[in-house]
Amino acid sequence: MPLVNQPGSKWEYGINIDWAGIVLERATGSRLNDLIQKGIIEPLGLKNVTMAPTDEMKKNLASMHQRWPGDASKAEERDHIYREPLIAETAEEKEKIFHSGGAGCFAQPSQYVQVLAALLNEGKSPKNGAQILKPETVNLMWENQIPEHPDFAREGMAAAKTEQTNPAPELYPQEGKYNRFYHSP
């Protein structure tokens, strides 16, 4: 992959989580969805969170919408960006689907927030008490991993695809806001 910028010079969303998923699959010999099911979804007691949506999940899927250049006020329905899992019918088609670590799961928001709730509760489900991560692992997630660049993630981002996204002027709250979730280096 060509570099968007020099390493260490700027923070930007990328395909790093997809690569981490590929490495995990190769190291374990298991598909990423299976690992997520066993390590996260099942312990939390969640249903219908998967990289292979059921027919019932497909019926309830929210449509994707797109804005066209020149008229940001109008959006129209478009095909889903990650559509392969939605159209795969046979076992062979489903086996060929890339399990994206960065964008592969389908879920209802009420199910997804249960994963977030466990993260905000030191890796433990507030609903059923299942511990999916150690508290010290979760604490590392909130720490700046590049202390020589404390504001990388605060720079904001331009809209990556203006027809689908909005710019984000600030991604993390500044020190003092929401102190419960912010850990300064």
Image (cartoon, grey):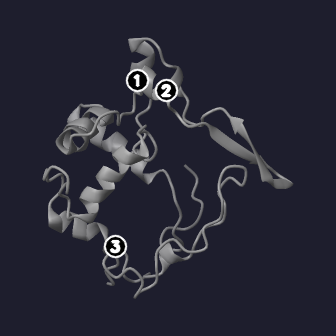
Q: Nearer the viewer, mark 1 or mark 3?
A: 1
Residue type (three-letter) at the residue carrying disc 1: Thr
Q: CA distance from mark 1 to mark 2?
A: 6 Å
Query: Which of the two labelled residues, at mark 1 and mark 3, occupies the earlier sequence position?
Result: 1
Residue at the spot x=42%, y=47% of the render? 109
Residue 177 is situated, as x and y percent measured from the top left of the image, at 42, 83
Residue 67 is situated, as x and y percent measured from the top left of the image, at 75, 48
Pick whichever, 68 or 111, lies toward us: 111
Q: Which residue is mark 1?
A: 54
- Up/down of 93 relative to 178, above or below: above
Residue 123 is situated, as x and y percent measured from the top left of the image, at 20, 59
Query: Which of the two labelled residues, at mark 2 and mark 3, occupies the earlier sequence position?
Result: 2
**Whether residue 96 is visible:** no
Q: Which residue is mark 3?
A: 145
- Up/down of 69 relative to 65, above or below: below
Residue 58: give its label. 2
Q: What SS does tag 2 mark? A: helix
Residue at the spot x=49%, y=19% of the render? 88
Residue 2: give its label. none
Residue 110 is situated, as x and y percent measured from the top left of the image, at 38, 47
Q: CA distance from mark 2 to mark 3?
A: 38 Å
Q: What SS does tag 1 mark? A: loop
> Quadrant of the rendered structure where residue 46 is?
top left
Residue type (three-letter) at the residue carrying disc 3: Gln
Q: Is residue 152 left or right of residue 49?
A: right
Q: CA distance from mark 1 to mark 3?
A: 38 Å
Residue type (three-letter) at the residue carrying disc 2: Lys
